[in-house]
């Protein structure tokens, strides 16, 4: 029984799973961003071209996850596009988490520590500057 479970969870199967996960995450994020882009063009496509000569910062709804979720409830196309970007950013981070799980299953302590350090650095740099 133990040999069967070990045979199911080997390096090749984990790599195949991670590869499929990355492909699925990329396709889902592209699909969400495409839907948001099409909705944006339908609702704003006939408006005049904005003035790109001056920079106008984005509102909080486009730069924070709670703002994006709040905008999704109203069906805003911009927040749908932002959700696609968030999914695209989250996909490689979840890949690192999956790698961490795979190294834990393999009981490879050195790579578990290295992967934990990489994950901590990424999460700290992502959320370190936020004022939540």
Image (cartoon, grey):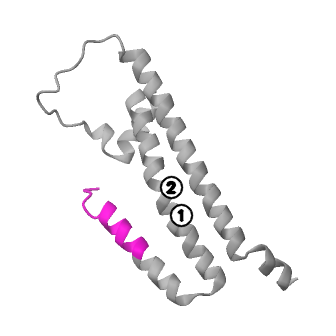
Task: Rate crowding at label 1 as few (under 14), some (14 to 19) or many (20 or more) other CA atoms within 10 Å.
Answer: some
Q: Which mark is residue 95?
A: 1
Determine whether, in the image, residue 127 is placed left or right of residue 115: left
Residue at 46% x, 35% y: name it: 33
Query: In which image quadrant can residue 66 be found?
Result: top left
Q: How many marks?
A: 2
Quadrant where the image shows the N terminus: bottom right
Q: Residue 42's x, y, as percent?
A: 43, 16
Residue 74 visible? The answer is: no
Q: Residue 94's x, y, as percent?
A: 52, 62
**Relative to 27, is 119 above or below?**
below
**Do the residues under discs 2 and 1 have CB atoms within 8 angstroms?**
yes
**Relative to 87, is 8 above or below?**
below
Q: Give the residues in magenta.
A: 118-132
Q: Is residue 59 magenta?
A: no
Of helix, strand and loop, which mostly describes the magenta segment?
helix
Mark 1: which secondary structure? helix
Q: Residue 16's x, y, as percent?
A: 67, 63
Residue at 60% x, 49% y: name it: 24
Q: How far apart are marks 2 and 1 (CA)?
A: 6 Å
**Relative to 58, is 45 above or below?**
above
**Relative to 76, is 85 above or below?**
below
Q: Mark 2 points at which residue?
A: 91
Q: Which mark is residue 16?
A: none
In-front residue for pair 52/129: 52
Q: Residue 104's x, y, as percent?
A: 60, 81
Residue 35 visible? The answer is: yes
Q: Is residue 119 magenta?
A: yes
Mark 2: which secondary structure? helix
């Amino acid at each position: 029984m133990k040999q069967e479970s070990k045979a199911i969870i080997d390096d090749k199967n984990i790599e195949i799973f991670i590869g499929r996960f990355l492909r699925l995450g990329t396709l889902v994020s592209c699909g969400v961003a495409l839907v948001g882009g099409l909705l944006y063009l339908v609702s704003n496509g006939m408006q005049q071209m904005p003035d790109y000569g001056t920079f106008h910062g984005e509102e909080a709804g486009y730069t924070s996850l709670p703002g994006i979720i709040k905008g999704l409830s109203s069906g805003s196309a911009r927040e749908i596009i932002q959700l696609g970007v968030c999914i695209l950013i989250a996909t490689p981070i979840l890949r690192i988490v999956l790698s961490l799980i795979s190294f834990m299953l393999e009981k490879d302590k050195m790579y578990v520590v290295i992967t934990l350090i990489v994950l901590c650095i990424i999460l700290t740099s992502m959320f370190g500057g936020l004022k939540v």
